[in-house]
Each structure stands twice: as structure tokens, then as C-alpha cells.
Image: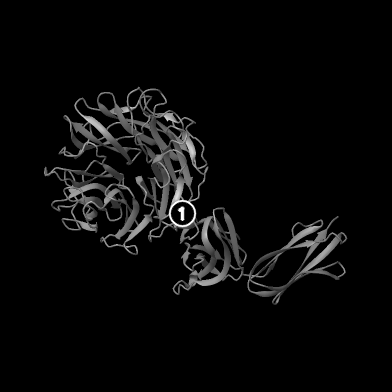
Amino acid sequence: MKTLFLLTIALLINTSFAQWSTDPNTNLKICDVAGEQALAKIAMTSDGGCYISWFDTRSGSYNVYLQRLDALGYKQWAADGLLISNNPQDTWITDYDLICDQNDNAVIVFSDIRSGGLLKPFAYMISPTGNFLWGANGVDISTGDNFQPSPVVTETSDGNFVFAWISSDGSQKIALQKLSATGQKLWGTTPILIQSGTEDYSYPAVVKSDNDQVILVHTVQTGGFPPQVRIRAHKLDLNGQLVWGSTGVMIQDNGQMAFFQVPEVESDGNNGALIAWYDGRAMNNLSSSFIQHISSAGNLYFPANGAEGSLAAERNKFSPQVAYNSATQETYLFWIETEPNQNQNGICGQKFSPSGNRIWGNTGMVFVPLSAPNTKSISDLSSHMGNNQIYIFYLDSQASGLNSMTMGFACDTTGGFIWSGNFVTLSNATQEKLQMETAMDVYKNCKLVWGDKRFDASGIYAQDINPSGQLGQPVIPVELTTFEAVVNNNEVILNWTTSTETNNRGFEIERLISENSLAQNWERIGYVEGNGTTTEPKNYNFIDKETPEGKVQYRLKQIDFDGSFNHSNTIEVEINYPDDYILFQNYPNPFNPVTVISFQIPTKSYVSLKIYDLLGNEITTLVDEEKNSGVYSVNFDAPKYASGIYFYEFKAGDFRETKTMLMLK
């Protein structure tokens, strides 16, 4: 009898051995070579690693580079990155986008002037091994020769990719194209245009929705300078048709936004979108932060024109950032707060109910109090939600913007600080920092990347911080790719394989007799040494030779070097013992010179199996020991014996039986 069970599981542990720096004075250098490295982006892979991209002038003009890090922070490609494009760029650069798809490929889209003249967008897909899956020069996703900067991208629910960018030829439109996973254009040879004869459109963002559809959010500008600026949302179906009509859904319709402001747009994880911005609707020379939540059906969860984060008087509330708890449908908004002259800086936040009601009071909660006048500048605010904690990061600089430190804090759902000392310094290097981007991996480690002038014009540096606020010690899995139990007679053979290990001392094997499940007493039946820290697959096995009859459960207790541990999920097997003593006929019979003799015993017994010749002389003993209940097989190898009839005698307890076999040479 043989039974097989497979289970894929992941155990989470901490590691103290990582390429990520534990020293805020050092950080992880991604690239800092001659020239300027700027405008870094970061995208998470499914295993806790990441891709980091940037523009680079090491060769004299702006090229695009990409690096992949594993979960420990080790570079997977050349030390200073993989060259993605050295096609001609202008002397200045515009924003671009980087994501990681469901197959852990990097998808990067940027504009350059390779076609001559003005900027046009091109999209690339790069595999984890650095292969260019959409060709060495990517895919030209646009047509025409007009100015087309700042492309963005999202992956759809069906594994396709929708790109959006500004298309300007006297008026500004939003252009869109959809590519398949193989880089084929799905919306025709020319992009879809969202346009108006009376409005200009800017700053597109796209998020995944249901059924291969996407939600597009962009600003709407009307009037002279400064223009009236609003926010509109559209939904496009899988064929690029507008689902919510030609006018879409207005997110902000009072026109009091700054024309240079880029709204913050995030997926809600349920096919909808969250949009945050600040505006001056009070007409008092002050700005306040607002947020709106739109469903996949185009319904607004919050009041028209958004829910306001704080009613505090004589305060500006700039640069709002969103964190969303999909389990409770509660929304968190954080912003940079200043007094009217913007000489004092702090950070405040608000929690909203699913319908947009303020939970932390009408003035929100203060996390970083206003600084003394002309002493501090806060910028590059970001926030992430994980494990019912919100992680907030920012650049803390002198009032001039120089001598920046990278700072962070975490709060719980009540607004209480979580990390020791409340605030953590992620980078102490006090040179100027630029354009910080942050992301959170599947294990809730946060990773930050920024431009840094610590040595020259600007390099790219990064830092990891785990959910406990520790630097360079990411929570990383000991990942079991298989865990199986094979029942063979009265034994259970456990096999498991890990794809990665970090700080793994070993595995205790635990067993629970299911028939006695009321007691729930797991017993330790063995231990297998681990392999410490490795990114190579490792195979393990353990044999349970003392198995009771009936249903039995097994689990692994993975133990860290510091004594911390995690349990795997359980697997169950059923062991059925034989009912009778049986001696089976040998096979093959006749034989030359090897045959197999099998027998079955229902209880633990002392077993004897002997071979006799035709005259009754004992010529060999195959078994002479105590055995547990089960079915057994042994080989009789007889090259030195003559052809003829032989007898094999089986004794177990009070049972005795003899059978005949024939050897023919």
C-alpha cells in the first residue's frame, strides 16, 4: 500500500545575514558610478526581492538601467545594473513607470527621442534572468511624432498590460495601448485617445479592475493660466471602450487644484481605486488634503469632491498619501502639514470609515509635530498598509532641502506608534537626497530607493526595513516547495524540499495520532539539521518506523538559530495493518538466480525466514529478527547454488508455513 500527499507551504523567519545594510550610515549602494544616476523606481517580486530602475549618464547621455535584487538584497545582475536602453534621450527626462508582473518579469515603460524629434513611449519586458522578452528595443506603443511623455502601466486581471501617457499636439490628450504578455498590440496599431475640444488632460494613472478592464484617472484642465484643474475617472473594458460614458466620473469638480499636482492613485485590491489630492476650495490661500474611493461600478463611497482629512484652521495639508485596509475597508490618509507661510513642517493623518467619515477627529492625528520655523523640510512622503500596521516614510531635510535623512515610523490602526523609539532613521548620510520611492513586499518588509549625492552628482541607494522596524533584517521565508508523506507498510517516509532558507537551524518532526485528536498532543519524533542560509534548493527526508495503526498527522517545526520557530501546515496519512500472517509465493518462479520472497505479519513478531535444499539441509537464513506489523519483501540471490527444488520456511509467533520454489539455470 502506498499513499502520497503533497503540500506547498511557506514558513516565515527573520534573518540576520543579509546584503541589506543594518547601518543607516551606509545603506545598500545600487549604483554610484561616474555621471548622474537619477529618478529611481522600485517594483516587488513575488519572493520578497525587487527590481530597481533608473536613468544614468555614465556614458554622457541618459540611458536606462535595471537591477534585480533577491530577498536578501543580493544583486542578481552586473554590479552596476543591466543596460535596458541607450537610445537617444533629451538633455532632460520625464517620469516613467516600472512594475513586476505575475510571472516576476519587469515591465518598464519610458519615453525617448530615438524616432527623432519629440519624446515617444517604448515598453520593455525583462525576465528574471535579464532576457529582453519584447525584443532588444522594446515595443513602440505610440504613433505620430508629437510630444508624448510620462507613460504609466498596469497589469490586468488576465495578464495583459495597459499603458497610458500624455499625447500633446497643441491640446493634451490621454493615449492608451494594451499589450499581451507576448508584446502584441491588442487595441489596434494606433493608440486609443481620450480627448476633448475644450479640455486638456494630464497625469494619467491606471489601476487593475475586473474582467481584464482598467480604471483610468487623470486631471482635467480648463481656462487660462493658471488653469482650473479637476480630476476625472474612466473605466475601459477589455476592448478599450469607455464603460462609464464619455464624461466618466468626476472625482474632484471644483477646479481648485494646483496645475502641477499629480494625484495619488492606488488600487483598493477589490477592482476599485483610491484617489488623493489637495486643493484650495476654501479660497483662503490654504490647501487641504482630500480622498475619494471609487468602486469597479463607478460608485463613489465618499462624499462628492472627496472626504477632507482635517478641518484644522491656519494649516496647509499637502502631498496626501493613502493606505487601505481591504479587510475592514478603512482608509488612512497621511499628509505634510505646514502653517500658512510654509516655514514649519510636520506630518498628520486621518482614518476614514468605509463611507468616508473621519474617525480620528476633525483635525486628525499629529505624528510629527510642526518644526520650529525655518529648520526643517519634509518631502517624498509615502505610506503602506500591512499586518494591520501602517508604515510611513519621508525625507527629513534642512529648510534648504539639503542634508537629508531618510526617516520612518509605523502606527497601528488606532494611530499608536509601534516601533521602538517611535521613529527610525533609515539613512543618516546627510547629503541631499532626491526622488525617494518606496514599496512593500509580500512579507511586509518595506524597501526604499532614492537618488543620493553622498559622493557625486547623484547615485542610487536603497534600504530595507522589516515590520518590527529593524534595518537589514528582512522577514524572509524558509519556503517548502514540497512536503509529502509516503506510507510503505508500517513506515511513513516524509520528504520535503526547500527553495530558499535563511538562518535555518533545522526541523523537528512532530506527530499527532488523529484517533486521539481530543488530546491534541503533538509528539516530537525526530530532528533533521537545516542548511542555515541558502538560496539553493535543499532536499530532506525522515522515516517514522514506529507508526500506530489509523490516521496520523505530521507537521514540521522549523527552528531558527535564535530559537524562534514556526510550524508548517499538517498532512495526514492512514495506516492499515495486516489482519493475518501470510507467506506469499516467491516471484519469479522458476527463477535464475534471484527471486523475491514476501510475507505479512499483523502484529509485532519475531520473524524467521530460512532456505532449505531438497534434502532438508538449511543453506541460508534471510530473516532472523523482530519486525513490526507490515508487509515485507526480501531477495534470495542464489548464483552459487545448483538448479533444483528449494524450500523456504517462514516462522512468526505461533505461525509457521513452508513453500516450494524452483531454480532453473
**Helix, strand, or loop for circle 1?**
loop
Q: Is residue 557 left or right of residue 229?
A: right
Where in the figure is residue 309, as x and y percent of width and height?
A: 19, 51
Residue in the picture at 38% in, 29% down: 90
Q: Is residue 467 visible?
A: yes
Q: Please give left or right for residue 192 compared with residue 618 in the image.
A: left
* Residue in view at x 32 percent, y 26 percent: 147
Residue at 44 percent of width and 40 percent of height = 106
Toward the viewer: 586 or 570?
A: 570
Q: Residue at x 40, y 41 (%)?
A: 457
Residue type at mark 1: give it.
Trp
| The quadrant where residue 350 appears | bottom left
Work out which quarter of the rendered image holds the N terminus and state it: bottom right
Direction from residue 191 to residue 139 in the image, left or right: right
Give percent across and percent down for residue 393: 32, 52
Q: Residues within 10 Å of mark 1 (few under 14, many from 20)?
A: many
Name the residue that disc number 1 marks. 20
Q: Is residue 119 above or below residue 339?
A: above
